[in-house]
Amino acid sequence: MLYLVIGLFVAVAVGALFKQKQKPSGAQAGDAAAQGTEAPGGKESEAAAGKGAEVPSGGSLPTLHEDIAPLDPVLAAKPISSPNAVASATYSTAAPAGEESPYAYSASEPKTKGKASATLLRWCGRSNSIQVSDFVVLSPVTYWSNGPSSTEEPCCIDITLPVEFPEEGAALPADGAPSYREMTPLQRGIYLTWLAGGRIQPPFHLCYPSIWLYGLERRAMADRLDLGLCISEAFCMLPLMRWENVLDTFIRFITWMAVKIWLPEDELLALCKKLLTVPEELLGMLLGSYANSMLPLPSAVAFTLMRTSAKLKEAAFGSEAPQIAHSNDLLQQFTPLYKTACSGGLILEKPKTSVTLSYTPTNPTLASQKEAAGGTVELPNFFEDLKPFQRLVNVWKDFVATLTPPRPETAAEALEERPDFEGFITSLRPEGSDDPLLSTLGALGDLMKLDRAEEKVHGRFRKDMVDMAQVEGYQILPNLGISGRDYRWEDRVLFLPLELGTALSQDYYTAAFLLEFLCSLTGAREQRVFEPLRQRLNDYFTLSTEDNFRLEAQRWLHLPAPHPPEHYGEFIQVWLQDEDRAVLRTFLIDCLSLFPDAQARADELKAAICAVLSIADDAPPPLEEQAPKERGDKILKILAPLFKI
């Protein structure tokens, strides 16, 4: 018993001594952890912490210490080469979503302590909104920032920039800007109003859809996110594009996206229904699943192919191939002819050659980024050899013949049973076309049974033509009432719808004549030359939206210019005095100062203007003395007396 008591006493004493030796070290480590200072032990303690585990004295579970590493975006879809990828083409990122997070734009570098983070470029998609002052834009589908973005991006909506929203009835600026930052406050207001309206109205200027497309390109090609969203949003924009170059850009972007996500057949057909001509790459995708499958080409695919393929339409009708819009009724008429002639349907083999498709972003900040170029894709080339489609081409010839009966040689012959102006318009307009109607003064003279014995068209005849067209709800271009100008029966004219009783302003008449004159002076042959000239006239004259539509339609007449500059100079010299022609010379030189080739052709254009107006080639007065509207008013007073009808 004595030995047992002695043993217990020794055990308690040894335990107390051991506990007393451990206590100072544990307390010191705990204090260091609480105050954020280095504990004794120096590098050895650092090494222990670096291993990620530290055992507290209280005996609780170890605490892990590690820095959060930035995460790259993760593709939450099937491989992009899969035909079914579009069904799951949604993307996500595991990065935090806080405004000050370095991962808000997929950054790969951690934040630097002690320095203010750069303003981030943020994406605002279909389910989000942007607030600019008190104005809220829902579903803008573009990028934004709260100040100058650290990532250069023309489409970025900087919410700190001033905005001026347009007032009802106020004149809108006719010029554009290359980026949101370079827009004027009023242009930003117009752009934001268009976005807030859901982008369902035609944009006022081509710069607005172009800048918006920059965002889709960055999202799809640089960030590689939301491909399905980008193609669907661009597709919805197609019916609103009235500028051919912008429309072509959207079609190229949609084509590239469709190939990248391998758009399903039903969605490809839905896209093709909206277009009169479809790129060969999209048609190749449509045909690809049937090649070597021994499956007959469905009538809907065959109908779409012949209606939209430029090469197949040319093979059937040459350069005069009719443009036919999609129609379910026409498809039903086409189907029995096609199945009978092709024994149930055309069987295709996979072609031996391929075509390479690539896409270069229009966004200028992506042009130098190789990863944003998207690379190239090879697709079967079904249209190098058209022999496999010969039976289909023959069917299309017979089918179109039933839709478009033989046209008479002259308009007068077409009106034997319907001698009225509406019949005149109907007989000359191509089937299914919404384009302005082009004709000649001679064709209209035949309709009205006018005497065409003389080469020139008398003023009384021209007045009768204008009066009849106005009663029928049409305007004739060019202006047939310019004093001193010669008109001939072979001159082309354009018929535009005009609401009965609409009075066209002198500003419009003056701008229309000057646009025609400028096209002749510059030798304009392309839309890229015509459009800046048309927009430039808005700086000088008060033109409504309808006036601009009428001026834009003049490209059908003046590309290429039908008359040389001397044609206009002859009657200008007769009707205008020297001082008025000097003012007109100065005006034309100023108007052409923003012409695309102005610097290279400045001397040539100036000499041509002086020669046509028969005015001395001396230095014009400084242009800064008058505002553009003031110069426009002065020209208006000079030219207005020329317009009689």
Image (tube, helix red, strand yellow):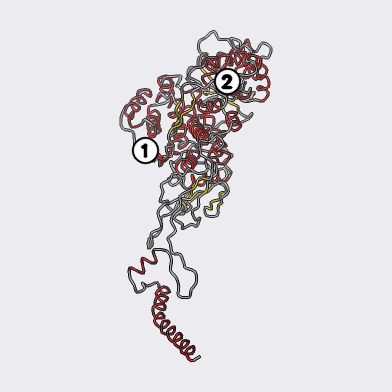
Residue tagged by mark 1?
623
- The one nearer the camera, 363 or 294, is 294
Label placed on residue 112: none
Q: Is residue 473 above or below residue 127?
A: above
Q: Quick one: label 1, few (<14), some, or many (20+) residues within 10 Å?
A: few
* Side of 221 relative to 345 (left or right): left
Label placed on residue 306: 2
Measured from the top left, where is residue 448 in percent x and y? Answer: 62, 14
Quadrant housing residue 117:
bottom left
Q: Would residue 336 be seen by someone viewing this image from the given angle? A: yes
> Element at badge 1?
helix
Quadrant housing residue 568:
top left
Which residue type carries mark 1?
Answer: Leu
Of label 2 and label 1, which has the lower sequence position?
2
- The one nearer the camera, 512 or 350, is 350
Measured from the top left, where is residue 610 in percent x and y? Answer: 35, 25
- The one nearer the camera, 403 or 575, is 403
Q: Would residue 507 be seen by someone viewing this image from the given angle? A: no
* Side of 427 relative to 520 (left or right): right
Which residue type carries mark 2?
Answer: Met
Measured from the top left, where is residue 242 in percent x and y? Answer: 53, 32
